[in-house]
Image (spheres, grey):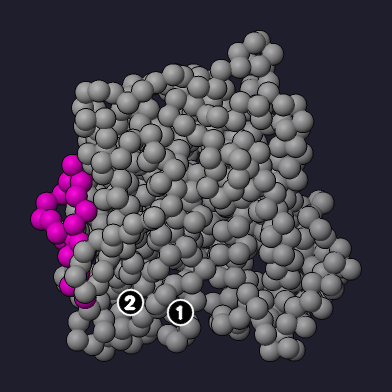
Amino acid sequence: MAKRIIIDPITRIEGHLRIEVELDEKNVIRDAWSSITLWRGIETILKGRDPRDAGLIVQRFCGVCTMVHYEASILACEDAFGVKPPPNARIIRNLMAGAWHMGDHIMHFYHLHGMDWVDVVSALSANPRKAVELAKSYHPDPYNCSETHYKAVQERLTKFVKSGRLGPFANAYWGNPSYKLPPEANLIILSHYLDALSVSKICGQMQAIFGGKNPHPQSLVVGGVTSVMDSLDPQRLGAFLFRLKDARNFVETAYIPDVLLAATYYKGEGLAGVGGGVQNYFCYGGFPLDDDWSTTLFPRGVVKGRNLAKPLQLDENKITEEVTHSWYKGTKPEHPYEGTTEPEYTGYDGNGYLKGNEKYSWCKAPRFDGEPYEVGPLARMVVGYALGDKRIKPLVEGTLNKTGLPASALFSTLGRTAARAIETKLVGDQIEGWVNELVANVKKGDTRTWTRCDVPSKAAQGRGMTEPPRGALGHWIRIENKVIANYQAVVPSTWNCSPRDKAGKRGPYEESLIGTKLAKADQPLEILRTIHSFDPCMACAVHIVDPKTNDVRKYRVA
């Protein structure tokens, strides 16, 4: 007999996410539903405003992914205005986004996702000397590696345990049979969890050097950037590079080795394709590398049906959103330029479960050519690998060779986690070159950081497409009478958390859980491991509504 379990809320994410699954008598997931349980409405708030103000407002979609919405909105306006930023502005935006990519991925693996792989309590029984030997088998000079350090980490953790207050490690499923790492491996990665707290801060400082602050940087404008003095100041550039060196060292000597270490013991899950989900992936293209923005670090493209031998082109006209199973009004798929956001909340069934055959989420259902697609680091690495990208393919192949896994193992929870680490190295390796490119421009006398522009007097529309840490992000704007007539954002977690569509096709979160076997039904660790591998950010994907009236909340600031 099928048994339904609910995880609400999913923790260690940004925002509010509910997962319901049906288990068979062997604790294998046979059906799944993902539901975002909070509504937002910023697209509605933007109507009637000056489009140049949109960037600062849409940053507030989220308290984490601030820079990325800022940039996508600016790009949408630039497309509508018909303006292109000068080379220095392109480079500075890349530097800000690159710093954010590194910090966000490091934070995700250690602080949001790492404890799905690492049994913290097991680390108490580790032998520090053996931990040193194990760490050195994955890198000749591991980050912060010594018997003394590992003993100190154990003592620190033991105090937590004896006090009965595990702090950030409380309320987990320690001892669950799905944990596979030996005590020494748990101790190594746990020690880097603590180190990563300061490294993430360093990456935030890097972004703030050109953005003014972090989160919610202030230096992007339609036509370029305002951080003119920072780009011309050798001391500021030196401070950026000094921090970059520390961050890259952590990636090389801690993050990459730790993912390879975990892959050794979770190899079976990769081979079995646990958590693979939908078979489709796409990338908008991110980090422009030339002045006409035609070449990007993350190449643009589509992989359908996991066919790595036949990558496809991305046709933006085939992007739609529909709301058959979402708490919105509407009956047909809409392209974002014509998208509507009208709430229609219908609640839960009489037993408190989601109405899986009706509407059950505040998340819309984005589709490309009528199919659900996964976006994010795995999608970017899969597309780059399929296209034979000269930077991405060697990194992916090198990682697969080190783990002894075939390319098919990419399509799994383990593959998704490894792709994020590969991508962090890829981005980190480019950043110093971008700084040098900026310096070379300035030396030649090119100090431009802004192209003059104004809101078009005629009706116009534009889209901003970019690739932030969590995946393909698109903002679409329509301008009439010099103000915003319509605004739609289709964000990475909307793609990945998508509910079913009219045809009944599940979204990536839902599909990724099908067939997963739980070691213990009352400890759904395997569900958390797979969902966390997408790095959910529900605040970006949802909206705010009055549950009694379905009206958008109205606020007035005196």
Quarter of the picture containing the C terminus is: bottom left
In percent of width and height, residue 282 lies at 36, 43
Q: Secondary structure at mark 1?
A: loop
Residue at the image point whose x is 56% and y is 82% from the top: 171
Residue at the image point whose x is 20% and y is 67% from the top: 550
Label 2 crowding class (10 Å Cα cut-off): few <14, some 14-19, many 20+? many
Name of the residue lying farthest toward the front:
558
Q: Nearer the viewer, residue 388 or 15?
A: 15
In percent of width and height, residue 159 lies at 77, 83
Type of residue at label 1?
Answer: Pro
Question: Is residue 407 among what the camera can see?
Answer: no
Q: Nearer the viewer, residue 462 or 301?
A: 462
Instruction: Determine which of the numbered discs, if any, sits on residue 524 in the image.
Output: 1
Q: Is residue 329 one of those drawn in magenta?
A: yes
Q: Quadrant of residue 438?
A: top right
Type of residue at label 2?
Answer: Val
Q: Which residue is mark 2?
A: 21
Depicted 239 relative to depicted 419: above or below: above
Depicted 216 relative to depicted 22: above or below: above
Quarter of the picture containing the N terminus is: bottom left
Work out whether mark 2 precedes mark 1 in sequence or the reverse, and give the earlier one.
2
